[in-house]
Image (cartoon, rainbow, N blue to C red):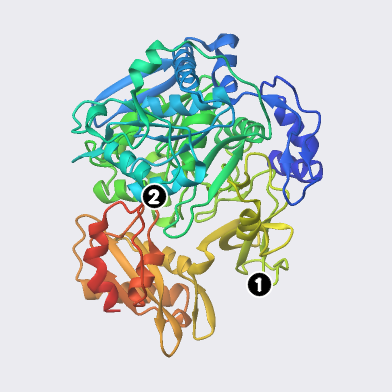
Amino acid sequence: MSTYEATYRRSQEDPGQFWLEAAADIEWTVPPTEALDSSSAPMYRWFPGAELNVSSNALDRHVAGGRADQAALVYDSAVLGTVTTYTYRELLSAVEKAAGALAELGVVKGDRVIIYMPMIPEALISMLACARLGAIHSVVFGGFAPKELAARIEDAEPKAIVTASGGIEPSRRVEYLPNVSQAMEMSTHQVNHVLVKDREGFENSLSSVPSAGAQWHDYDAVVSAAAPHPAVPVLATDPLYILYTSGTTGKPKGVVRDSGGYTVAMQWSMKNIYGVGPGETMFTASDVGWVVGHSYIVYAPLIAGATTVLYEGKPVGTPDAGAFWRVVSQHGAKVLFTAPTALRAIRKSDPAGEFIQNTPRPTLKALFAAGERLDPDTSRWIEDALGVPVIDNWWQTETGWPIASNPFGLEELPRKIGSPTFAVPGYDVRILDAFGEDLTEPNVEGNIAIKLPLPPGTLATLWGSDDRYKSSYLDAFPGYYTTGDSGYVDEDKYLFVMGRTDDVINVSGHRLSTGAMEQVVASHPAVAECAVIGVADPLKGQRPSGYVVLKSGVDIPEEELRKELIGLVRQDIGPVADFKDVAIVGALPKTRSGKILRKTMRQIADGEEYVVPSTIEDPSVIEELLSILRAV
């Protein structure tokens, strides 16, 4: 039996003992004596009665344990051309002072603090300062418009907001302060204090924005004058943070992460999934506003005693497609974690991989990808270019850490392109039919669900609404958490995630995955990326329609390419797919975290009312696609 198989079996046969053993790797003020509280099932709680402080686990224990002078945080700003390194001692001091500043403004255990910041050290410091006080942070991605920020203020009811003058993009500067002011004016909840980290080169300052009833403070002045604050013990079951899922309509869903279970899961996952330990460096190219940033820029690397890289820049354009490899080389990263969309952008700009070949990367041992489907063509390209394992790992905002992955740190398993390999120990992943019955035959697509209880570190509930948590995730299949994704398990038990369940379309009575069609289309050597959506058809119910972005330098007649792509889908999936519509486009509409807005595209194509999500990266892409989508 392999190491993975033995570990997974233990996690299923005796989960309580398994996670109590994992809990011994972190520092508790009151150690747990019980792993799981099932008394209010399906509302499970991990490590009831135990106490700890997450900030202390990320900082204090490493300073006390001999890592005070080791690099904890490397802030690499490609947009400013600067690099700043914080040792564990220096980062602890900054967090102690920031916690003291928040405490002097009246923030106490259980209060909420919204953090609306770009990728600068103060974002990470503010998160850890909240954790130090036992306050609950809610990081809102800095690109959100005032309406979306207001909705989160309304729901979380924060006592304070920590923000900055703005964010820096390759071609522009994004002013944050007017957004914060407008959001507070739109919300009925009164925020008491706003702390502003001043950055040079922005039009708006503390003196130029309306107060909106709150007291506005200069972050540096308040923090420098504050007394250092000690870590406040909290219950393992107390919330650490709220992270809102990106909704376009209705009240946002605030995923609640607990303190104890999350700390245990972060420590375990760094060692066993990512293979990064004390003194090693992890470069996660994401944003602290997303779950990947929360878990693998901020908390997990520091809890594990590693060095984390906070990168302010883009995969291309700051200054070129070699940016990631420069960071890996310069800072000695062992692991790079990014989104498939970033890899596709790099490939489009540097199809021959010249920047990769020209940058030495002796420390890099693996590349992890998550956030959306890692298409086989991109996976093969980047693995061939880098010469290290490329590991697809699948998870969600709700779970906080991987559901399925190749456990690189525990045991590197044979990989299958297009699959995130197996369920991670702790997750009992099932494929269910429409009636909630197990689909035991291989290669039969169904609903991916996870048998309860979920492991530590996953969502405890939704902020302010246990009932909404149950109706959103637990009611569809009693006894299971519904992921909302469809997929299948092959004859070797490898999991394949095909996309959201609304990506399954019905063509003349046949249920087909647009994700499977995308994989085929993306395999064509001329295709940089693509999207396939199901559009309404009066005869067949739905029919697939493809939208393709070409690689740089491709010279092929469009009609010839269309015929080749249609032929590929017919060959790999069959005539039943009825794949006949292909449009060549300049770009696909995406959120800032890289997800393609397939639902919005489908709504436009079907002539339905649609809302352009506030998370869209470039609204002009939708405008350019309108005529193409409506002509389908």
Question: How many labels sit on residues?
Answer: 2
Q: Which residue type carries mark 2? A: Glu
Q: Is residue 261 above or below residue 446?
A: above
Residue 186 visible, this orientation = yes
Q: Is residue 589 left or right of residue 428?
A: left
Establish if 541 lies above or below 393. below
Query: Which numbered circle lies on residue 453?
Result: none
Q: Nearer the viewer, mark 2 or mark 1?
A: 2
The answer to whether residue 361 shows anywhere in this view is no
Within-10-Å neighbours for mark 1: few <14, some 14–19, many 20+: few
Q: Residue 363: image x %, image y %?
A: 43, 27
Q: Assign a secondary structure to mark 2.
A: helix
- Percent x, y of residue 409: 59, 34
Q: Position of residue 373 (x, y in %)?
A: 46, 55
Q: Are marks 2 and 1 in contact (CB under 8 Å)?
A: no
Q: What residue lies at 52% left-to-right and 24% top-to-bottom? A: 302
Q: Is residue 353 above or below residue 528?
A: above
Q: Quadrant of the N terminus?
A: top right
Residue 91: x percent and y percent? 45, 17
Q: Using residue 567 as the reference point, say whether residue 239 is left or right of it.
A: right
Q: Decide which of 324, 224 is in the foreground and name it.
A: 224
Task: Kindly indicate the quadrant of the structure image that contains residue 549.
Answer: bottom left
Residue 2 is left or right of residue 421, and the answer is right
Q: Nearer the viewer, residue 312 or 45?
A: 45
State which quarter of the image contains the C terminus: bottom left
Residue 148, disc:
2
- For the point 44% across and 28% down, the residue is 124
Residue assigned mark 1: 434
* Label 2 or label 1, whichever comes before in sequence order: 2
Pick the residue in front: 529 or 144. Answer: 144
The amino acid at mark 1 is Ala
